[in-house]
Image (cartoon, rainbow, N blue to C red):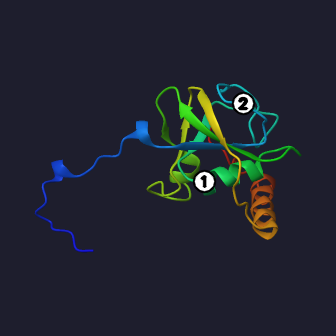
């Protein structure tokens, strides 16, 4: 596709966060209308209270959240609505994926559950094992995975 460089930039569409669909992957069993709030146990370390709650605009990132969260419960992906400002997730954008291609964010404000994705394709058992092994290796090396 050729793009005419003489196009007036003011005519280009802008990214509107209010129309973006956001997801949160977890193993918590929640219902529409409930809030996911900071200050509760982290999905990834039940000895720490989370200072932020995390959300993403991609199902793949939410799938990882649902698969890697602690617990034996079924992974769930919720459609969420931020109740306040959000920022790029520095755990991914600064460390692994500059420019935020995973569309991963965090907030100190609650997320309101507005729905649930009831059908989603998980990663292969091999991919999950590799990811969990890598996370465990970081933990053994004393590397904090979540910058809170």
Q: Which residue is mark 2?
A: 31
Q: Residue 24 placed where, x, y %?
A: 64, 42
Residue 71 horizontal side relative to residue 37, left or right = right
Q: Residue at x 42, y 36 (%)?
A: 18
Quadrant where the image shows the N terminus: bottom left
Asked whether residue 81 appears in the rendered view, the answer is yes
Element type at marker 2? loop
In terms of image quadrants, where is residue 140? bottom right
Q: Nearer the viewer, residue 127 or 114?
A: 114
2 and 1 marks in contact (CB < 8 Å): no
Q: Residue 142 placed where, x, y %?
A: 75, 50
Quadrant where the image shows the C terminus: top right
Q: Which residue is mark 1?
A: 59
Residue 8 horizontal side relative to residue 112, left or right = left
Q: Nearer the viewer, residue 105 or 147?
A: 105
Q: Earlier in the sequence, mark 2 or mark 1?
A: 2
* Vertical comparison of 72 with 113: above or below: below
Q: Residue at x 76, y 51 (%)?
A: 68
- Residue farthest right in this picture: 72
């Amino acid at each position: 596709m050729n793009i005419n460089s003489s196009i007036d930039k003011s005519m280009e569409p802008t990214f509107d966060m209010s129309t973006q669909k956001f997801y949160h992957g977890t193993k918590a069993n929640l219902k529409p209308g409930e809030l996911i709030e900071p200050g509760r146990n982290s999905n990834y370390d039940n000895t720490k209270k989370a200072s932020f709650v995390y959300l993403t605009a991609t199902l793949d990132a939410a799938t990882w959240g649902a698969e890697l969260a602690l617990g034996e419960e079924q992974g769930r992906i919720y459609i969420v609505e931020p109740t306040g400002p959000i920022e790029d997730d520095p755990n991914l954008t600064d460390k692994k994926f500059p420019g935020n291609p995973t569309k991963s964010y965090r907030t100190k404000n609650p997320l309101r559950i507005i729905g649930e994705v009831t059908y989603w394709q998980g990663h292969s058992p091999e991919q999950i094992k590799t990811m969990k092994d890598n996370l465990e290796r970081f933990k053994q090396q004393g590397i904090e995975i979540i910058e809170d």
